[in-house]
Structures are given as C-alpha cells and as structure tokens.
C-alpha cells in the first residue's frame, strides 16, 4: 500500500516540481508526517452533539465524525489558509478521512439573520437568478484580478436549488471554473431555516465528488435539529425579527462572500492541482494502518500558503 501510494504521489510531484527522486520522496514523507501530526492533535466526536451556541444539535451520522468549533476554526484558518475571523460551529468530516486532506467536509455555521420568510420559494425563476449570479461573478472577478486572486467563473448549477417547505430546508450546488485548473470546483450548500436565523452546512470539493456529497445530504438533514424554542415553527411575529433575506437571497449567496467562501474553495483547488484530492482517503488509510514504531508526533502547525480572498 505504502509503495503504491508513494509511487503515485512521486509521479505527480516530480512532474510538477521537477525534483529528483530523493527530494520528492523526502517531501512526501514530510507531508505524511505533517498529516499524522495534525490528526494526533484533533479530538473527533461522534454521537449527538450540541453546537457551541446551543441553538441546534447534530446526531453525527455513522460515516462522519465531528470537530468542535475551536478545532474546526484551526483547520479552516491554520491548515486550509483561510482569512482569520472564521466563525464555524463545527465541521463534519468523512469518517475514513483526515480533516486536513479530506476530499470534502461540511463546515457548520450559523447566520443570525432573523426569521427568513419562505413565501417566495415557489415563485423564483432559478434560471434567471443564475444569469444574474453569473453577471455578478464576472464583476467580482474584476476586483479579484486587482487583488491578484484567481478568477472564479460560475459555470452553472451542479444541482438545482430545491426548497423543502415541510422541513424548511433549502439546498443547491454550484459549479465553478478557475482558469488553469483541470477540474472544476463544487460548492454544495444547505440552509436549515430556524426561528432567528439559518444553520449553514457547506461542502466544497472537486466536481468529481458531487455524487459522494449528494448521497450524504439526506442523512445529514435527518441528523440536524434546532433545539426547543429555536425551530422555524417557534417564530413569534410579535417579538422576533424578520430577515431582510428571502429564499432567493440565500441562494444568491451574497452573505457567503463575508465568511471566506472563496478561500475555502481555493484550498481544495490546491489539492486538485497536486492530484492529491482523489488520493486523500488512501493517504489516511495508509497512516491509520501504519505500525506506530515511535511515540505520537507532537502538535505541528502547517504553514498556510494558499491564496486568500
């Protein structure tokens, strides 16, 4: 297993960096040590989790594991290289993956927007909305170019927006193209509407992971619940604030620009570029399967060198 993995990664790195064999293998071993070090520092949880703000719970599905707010923030900022100031409530990572190199993970956040009315859900022309979003994306790219940040071209819906009015859940997926990268990027968004805001579950990966992400949407939705008094049906028009956002506004995604959304995407693009994203599970299986011949590695911070938005 180890030799197959190293040969695959050796081919990738020598092709990209033109290093000699010794340097490349040393590089790969160093990366495996860093991944192992990061994993040793994390404290994954399973079972029923109450989010740190107490507003909702997650009954972690069997094929996932959970990182709390502090460790999710560490992964997003220090390992993935996002801008400081992220406010995750946690992160759901596939059970057979390491958080730092998972093919995808669901970042969990809460947006205190107020009560989002859903009376526009049946009236939205999502094709027209997509056209507007593409125009805005093109304008945003002009600003990104000035900042030296790669353009993010919105290709279209990877999964058309769908609103479940019975359970007050909205979800959709977008596909992005970045010039110079072979694989397009998937952004899968879930919004669970509550009494005073919206619970956010967001997965970002290569577009090839679409089926893997989609097959976990329903189990995740069944696992997430607002606590008593915070449900959508608990809304009190006499005391609660109504959000300025509607269903269409949530899909348009303008709020996401404030929470490092594009930086998260660029983290995954780096792994796509190196050809490592598809090998993430193999790397982690190798690490888990190794015989521990030495004491556990000490905590080590991996320098963040990804572009930031």
Image: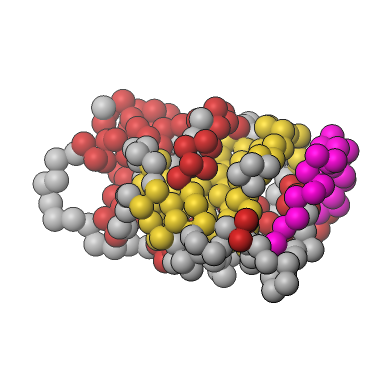
Residue 111: percent from left, percent from top: 63, 63
- Asked if residue 82 can be seen in this view, the reply is no
Residue 218: percent from left, percent from top: 52, 36
Q: Is residue 77 magenta?
A: no
- Asked if residue 106 can be seen in this view, the reply is yes
In this picture, is 114 found above or below 206? below
The residue at 60%/50% (across/down) is 192
Q: Is residue 50 left or right of residue 173?
A: left
Pick the front one: 252 or 234 = 234
Based on the displayed image, in which of its 4 quarters is residue 43 positioned?
bottom left
Q: Is residue 60 left or right of residue 185?
A: left
In this picture, is 273 found above or below 118? above
The residue range painted magenta reads 113-141
Based on the displayed image, in which of its 4 quarters is residue 72 positioned?
bottom left
Residue 139: percent from left, percent from top: 86, 52
Residue 98: percent from left, percent from top: 36, 45
Instruction: Name, please, the residue furthest toward the bottom.
Output: 239
Q: Is residue 117 magenta?
A: yes
The residue at 87%/44% (across/down) is 132
């Amino acid at each position: 297993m180890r030799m197959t993995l190293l040969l695959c990664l050796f081919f990738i790195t020598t092709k990209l960096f033109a290093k000699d064999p010794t340097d490349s293998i040393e590089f790969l071993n160093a990366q495996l040590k860093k991944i192992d070090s990061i994993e040793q520092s994390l404290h994954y949880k399973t079972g029923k989790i109450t989010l740190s703000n107490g507003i909702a719970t997650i009954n972690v599905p069997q094929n996932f594991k959970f990182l709390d707010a502090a460790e999710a923030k560490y992964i997003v900022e220090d390992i993935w290289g996002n801008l400081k100031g992220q406010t995750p409530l946690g992160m759901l990572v596939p059970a057979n993956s390491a958080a730092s190199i998972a093919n995808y993970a669901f970042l969990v956040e809460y947006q205190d927007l107020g009560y989002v009315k859903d009376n526009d859900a049946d009236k939205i022309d999502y094709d027209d909305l997509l056209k507007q979003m593409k125009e805005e994306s093109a304008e945003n790219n002009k600003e990104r170019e000035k900042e030296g940040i790669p353009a993010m071209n919105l290709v279209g819906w990877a999964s058309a927006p769908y609103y479940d009015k019975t359970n007050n859940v909205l979800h959709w997926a977008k596909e992005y193209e970045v010039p110079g990268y072979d694989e397009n990027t998937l952004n899968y968004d879930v919004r669970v509407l509550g009494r005073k805001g919206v619970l956010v579950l967001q997965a970002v990966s290569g577009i090839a992971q679409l089926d893997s992400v989609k097959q976990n949407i329903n189990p995740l939705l069944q696992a997430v619940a607002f606590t008593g008094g915070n449900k959508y049906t608990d809304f009190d028009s006499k005391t609660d604030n109504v959000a300025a956002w509607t269903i269409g506004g949530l899909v348009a995604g303008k709020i996401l620009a404030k929470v490092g959304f594009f930086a998260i995407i660029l983290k995954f693009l780096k792994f796509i570029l190196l050809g490592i994203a598809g090998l993430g599970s193999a790397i982690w299986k190798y690490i888990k399967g190794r015989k521990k011949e030495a004491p556990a590695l000490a905590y080590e911070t991996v320098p963040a060198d990804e572009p930031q938005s």
